[in-house]
Amino acid sequence: MLKDCNCGALSRERVGEKVTLAGWVHRRRDHGGMVFIDLRDRDGITQVVFNPRISREAYDVATSLRNEYVVQVIGEVVLRPAGTENLKLSTGEIEVTAVKAVVLNESLTPPFYINEDVEVEESLYLKNRYLYLRRPRMKDNLILRHRITKFMSDFLDAQGFIQVETPLLIKSTPEGARDYLVPSRVNQGKFYALPQSPQQLKQLLMVAGIEKYFQIARCFRDEDLRADRQPEFTQLDLEMSFVEEDDILGLMEKLLVALVREVKPEMEIVTPIPRLSYEEAMKRYGTDKPDIRFGLEIRDISDIASEVQFGIFRSAVAEGGNVKGICLPGCAGFNHHRIADLTEVAKNSGAQGLVTVALTGENLSSNEVKSVIAKHLTPAEMERILSRCGARPGDLVLIVADQPPVVNRAMDELRRYVAPLLNLIDKNLLNFVFVIDFPLLKRNSEENSWECMHHPFTAPRERDISLLDTDPGKVGGRHFDVVCNGCELGSGSIRIHTHQLQEKIFSLLGYSKEDMFERFGTLLEAMRYGAPPHGGIALGIDRLVMMIAGAETIREIIAFPKNQNAVDTMFDAPSYVSESQLDELNLRLKRAVFGDS
């Protein structure tokens, strides 16, 4: 080894020892006659002192050093002079007096600071990702990710699960986002697909009698990107036989609570993890992935709105819509610009506008209420609305009237926008919640067809199976989500395990007999051979690490992510391939991309 000690491992207990360190020059300081460098490796930072009176040779090397040079240093561990300690570093009580130094490699000047956590343009840090990962924060994120996945594996191993790898080249069975397709050279004209998840494979493992399976699975989806999405992502995938919902949720609660306490004990986690029905989540928060760290709960005032003379409210309810509001405590004094911002949030969510009611008086019945609707409502009607919203003097009420999906979306976005403005979010809190009791199906009015709320393998509630023939919209699904701080981390369900019921669901979704066996024939056939009752869940590791690390996007916790256009700017991928490669695959592009050929 070119070093016998890590930079972050030294302490006052090592004083007097001779050590050999190796790493990168984090900072260099010339103090007139002596040179100081902060030497960095993955483990931490140690200050090294080059004194020409102790070693002229080492000092001469130090004068040539620049940031990010790779250096080997041999020296003695000594205490720092009194008053010069750096308590921000674990090694801040000591330093190493160099007797020898060797430059192992020089470095060009990096395109951005590595020793300062200042903002860098995304295109620059993605292009030079190998340099950005040298930043201590990014290194810490990758170490945290490692610890999380290792804990998951160890925890599930202790619970009797076995890890089974499933193929990355599978059959295309699009049932959600678009597949990434891989052409076959050997079987020309045919394509593999990269898995959006190992869903059918893990169910087949249950048919195979594995009973408890898990995998740290790589998954691929060709979909529009955002802060918590990447075209390739990692999930904790698990499946269990002979279980019900409570068994899976109980296991996940034990795993998540133990995980957080092990890898980030300073973070607070709410236990027991609360459970919300889908209906309750939509009613109180307007979304099935609610952030419940703060209040600002939604209040439905449709019944009151239907009786008032304000036309927008009355017509919204008459047309099957809702009128809902949230109360912002102490915000009656919001200025015009702040109100305009809130209105823009509502409009960007699809709403036609936003009604605000500011309680500037001393009680709900006071005439000192600032709102465009004040002249259209009687004092009693206004008091009923404000009371329903839980408003008090000094508060501001936000109201949206529209069709239910639009109102819910606007209310959700307003809650998320306002909470940080009012300092309502505890960033040290992880508030998990299980959302349960989803409908099995939803109606696509444009296509006049049924769609799955989860996926087509989710079992309906046994008491509702008869409704599949008469009223599918009222059938409950055995589906559940794991949400943390307003971010959906994963979904799971009890699966269908009989071919008769699975074929019935496929038929409801519009699949012909021929089509369902073309796409899902292997699973349907397997179900005829004694498939056990089973269920499972997939938990997004990228999003979970992002939450625990306190990162803004999952790009901060993935080593080599793609940008918002799904492009790897470091390797310039995707890229064109040669005509000869296309010929081998018997493929031809619609438009020529190779110059004039």
Image (cartoon, rainbow, N blue to C red):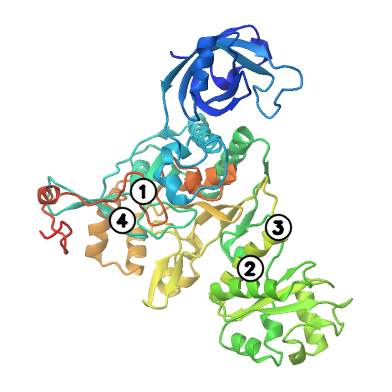
Nearer mark to the viewer, of 2 and 3: 2
**Mark 1 or mark 3, which has the lower sequence index?**
3
Q: Amino acid at mark 4?
A: Asp
The answer to whether any part of residue 531 appears in the image is no
Q: Is residue 99 above or below residue 562?
A: above
Is disc 1 surrounded by few (<14), some (14 to 19) or many (20+) residues within 10 Å?
some
Q: Amino acid at mark 1?
A: Thr
The answer to whether any part of residue 357 appears in the image is yes
Across and down, in percent, residue 258 comes to 61, 36
Q: Quadrant of the N terminus?
A: top left
Tell which of 132 and 380 is nearer to you. Answer: 132
Q: Amino acid at mark 2?
A: Leu
Q: Which residue is mark 2?
A: 414
- Residue 179 - label: 4
Q: Which residue is mark 1?
A: 569
Is the C-beta separation of discs 3 and 4 under 8 Å? no
Secondary structure state at the residue bearing disc 1: loop
Is disc 3 surrounded by few (<14), some (14 to 19) or many (20+) residues within 10 Å?
some
